[in-house]
């Protein structure tokens, strides 16, 4: 058969295939952009009114595509519907243990016969046992199984293959007890125990409904940096601020004593109350001094809890930063009033 005849005999079929392909592509585009079915019918009708067979072919293809799109849409609705909610891990045993440390700390502070040095020595002894055990746990499967069976309910998933947070907790607490005055160290530990727990609980509950903290801060006199952990929310930040402020108010007004109301500060020895308390030493007195101290403690708690310092555990950084920031406040206040 001559080449011209072969070209003539095959060209109608190829032309028909090309037309159907173009129309299928157009139908896909219309489905993707949500064009109304009436508009789709008009657009298709204008291009194939002279070929009924092509209309039937295109109609079958378009109907099949629409059916597939409808099924896919229903599946997406079911997949993203309200029936599927991400389960929140509240870590209740861990939080109960975490919060109980605050009550133990407060009880020790109110016991005159127990000194901070003695508490620190006990904690160092506990660390000397826990640290080697943690190293062995990560290297010996048999020890790991026994360890997790006994204490696994207190561990996060990341701690099963990494360092136990208890080690950082003890280091942070001992740093505060060693380098800060006893009342400041106590408040720093209470912030670690209660403000951190409040931030975690409220953050999990209301964090998805609030905006995340900014990933970076840029000031005219400060280069851009990324201080906050990406998972921190405004709800958790505010919870930590409120809890930290409440801790400072309850402690220094009721327990630590600031000459505003009669508390239980006299349960400590005379040396550790009165002029020896940190607020009194730096001239933080009266309602104005108490309000300034409480507000500072609240902001410090929120910021310290949300900071991301190269992946360091917040059980270590929170008491160190909060206690150091409070000491900075006292020294600045004392310098301002001439008491430092």
Image (cartoon, grey):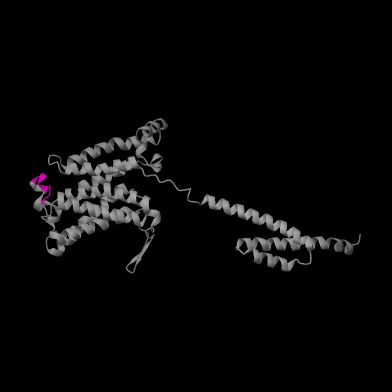
How far across and how far down the image is residue 196, in percent? 30, 49
| Of the pair 154 and 46, the residue shown nearer to us | 46
At a point 28% along the width and 55% down the height, the residue shown is 241
| Of the pair 105 and 28, the residue shown nearer to us | 28
Q: Would residue 179 be seen by someone viewing this image from the given angle? A: no
Left or right, 275 with respect to 81, comes to: left
Q: Which residues are magenta?
A: 262-269
How far across and how far down the image is residue 67, in percent? 65, 54
Residue 183 drawn above or below residue 135:
below
Magenta stretch mostly in which secondary structure?
loop
Q: Residue furthest front?
A: 38
Q: Residue furthest left?
A: 270
Q: Quadrant of the N terminus?
A: bottom right
How far across and how far down the image is residue 118, in percent? 18, 39
How far across and how far down the image is residue 246, in percent? 23, 53
Q: Is residue 339 magenta?
A: no
Quarter of the image for residue 331 reads bottom left
Quarter of the image for residue 214 reads bottom left
Q: Quadrant of the C terminus?
A: bottom left
| Of the pair 159 and 132, the residue shown nearer to us | 159
At a point 18% along the width and 61% down the height, the residue shown is 332
Residue 150 drawn above or below residue 257:
above
How many numbered circles does the render carry? 0
Left or right, 177 with respect to 98, comes to: left
Q: Residue furthest right?
A: 1
| Of the pair 230 and 44, the residue shown nearer to us | 44
Q: Would residue 70 be seen by someone viewing this image from the given angle? A: yes
Residue 295 drawn above or below residue 116:
below
Left or right, 180 with respect to 87, comes to: left
At a point 37% along the width and 50% down the height, the residue shown is 205
């Amino acid at each position: 058969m001559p080449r011209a005849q072969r070209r003539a005999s095959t060209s109608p079929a190829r032309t028909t295939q090309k037309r159907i392909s173009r129309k299928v592509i157009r139908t896909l585009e219309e489905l993707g952009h949500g064009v109304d079915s009436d508009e789709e019918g008009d657009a298709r009708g204008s291009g194939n009114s002279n070929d009924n067979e092509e209309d039937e072919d295109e109609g079958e293809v378009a109907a099949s595509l629409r059916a597939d799109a409808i099924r896919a849409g229903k599946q997406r609705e079911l997949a993203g519907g309200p029936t599927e909610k991400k389960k929140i891990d509240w870590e209740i045993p861990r939080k109960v243990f975490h919060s109980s440390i605050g009550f133990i700390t407060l009880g020790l502070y109110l016991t005159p016969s127990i000194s901070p040095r003695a508490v620190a020595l006990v904690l160092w002894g506990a660390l000397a046992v826990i640290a080697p055990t943690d190293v062995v746990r990560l290297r010996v499967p048999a020890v790991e199984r026994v360890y997790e069976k006994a204490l696994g309910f207190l561990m996060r998933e990341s701690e099963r293959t990494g360092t136990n947070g208890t080690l950082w907790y003890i280091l942070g607490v001992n740093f505060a007890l060693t380098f800060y005055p006893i009342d400041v160290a106590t408040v720093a530990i209470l912030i670690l125990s209660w403000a951190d727990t409040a931030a975690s609980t409220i953050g999990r509950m209301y964090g998805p409904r609030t905006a995340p903290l900014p990933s970076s801060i840029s000031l005219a006199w400060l280069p851009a940096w990324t201080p906050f952990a990406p998972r921190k929310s405004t709800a958790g930040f505010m919870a930590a601020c409120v809890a930290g402020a409440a801790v400072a108010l309850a402690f220094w007004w009721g327990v630590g004593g600031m000459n505003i109301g009669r508390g239980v500060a006299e349960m400590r020895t005379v040396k550790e109350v009165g002029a020896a308390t940190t607020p009194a030493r730096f001239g933080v007195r009266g309602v104005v001094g108490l309000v300034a101290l409480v507000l500072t403690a609240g902001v410090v708690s929120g910021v310290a809890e949300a900071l991301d310092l190269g992946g360091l555990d917040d059980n270590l950084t929170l008491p160190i930063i909060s206690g150091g920031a409070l000491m900075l406040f006292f020294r600045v206040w004392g310098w301002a009033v001439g008491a430092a």
